[in-house]
């Protein structure tokens, strides 16, 4: 019994190293989205097989240096919420990190 409890906490601890902060959902950045604004495009993001649009990505410059050299899809962990003011498939990213 003690070994199984120890294994459980060890698993939780190791799993938390893979995900930064509260970024628990797995997703992919599929590319840029210019439907809202051609000069300041947003992002196409897939989470759990559903495609969403996001206007911005927090700490984008740390996540990928130059948008011109990025190869999509970019595997990520993220925390998000549905945008209250826009259409159903638009989200606001609260937390994001590379997978």
Image (spheres, rainbow, N blue to C red):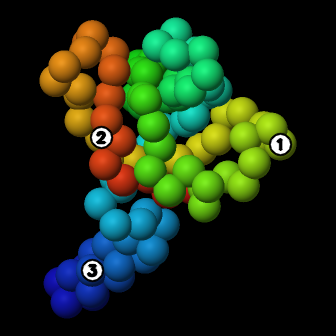
Q: How far apart are labels 3 and 1 at the CA level?
A: 40 Å
Q: Residue 50: x, y in percent? A: 41, 19
Relative to 99, say whether 28 is above or below: above
Q: Which residue is mark 2?
A: 80
Q: Which residue is mark 1?
A: 69
Q: How far apart are labels 3 and 2 at the CA level?
A: 26 Å
Label 3–label 1 contact, CB within 8 A: no
Disc ID at residue 9 = 3
In the figure, residue 48 lies in which quadrant? top left
Q: Residue 62: x, y in percent? A: 60, 61
67 horizontally vs 57: left or right: right
Dot 1: element: helix
Number of on-image labels = 3
Q: Is residue 15 visible?
A: no
27 horizontally vs 31: left or right: left
Label 2–label 1 contact, CB within 8 A: no
Residue at image point 31% right, 35% down: 92
Q: Nearer the viewer, mark 3 or mark 1?
A: 1
Residue at image point 31% right, 48% down: 94
Foreground residue among 60 and 71: 60
> How dense is the environment of label 1, judged by Cα within 10 Å: few (below 14), some, or many (20 and up)?
few
Disc ID at residue 59 = none
Q: Nearer the viewer, mark 3 or mark 2?
A: 2
The C terminus sits in image quarter: bottom right
């Amino acid at each position: 019994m003690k070994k199984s409890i120890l294994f459980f906490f060890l698993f939780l601890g190791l799993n938390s190293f893979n995900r930064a902060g509260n970024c628990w959902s797995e997703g992919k950045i599929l590319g840029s989205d210019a439907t809202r604004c051609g000069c300041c495009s947003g992002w196409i993001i897939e989470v759990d097989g559903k495609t969403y649009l996001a206007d911005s990505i927090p700490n984008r410059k740390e996540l990928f240096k130059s948008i011109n050299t990025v190869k999509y899809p970019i595997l990520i962990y993220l925390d998000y919420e549905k945008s209250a003011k826009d259409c159903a498939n638009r989200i606001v990213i609260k937390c994001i990190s590379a997978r």
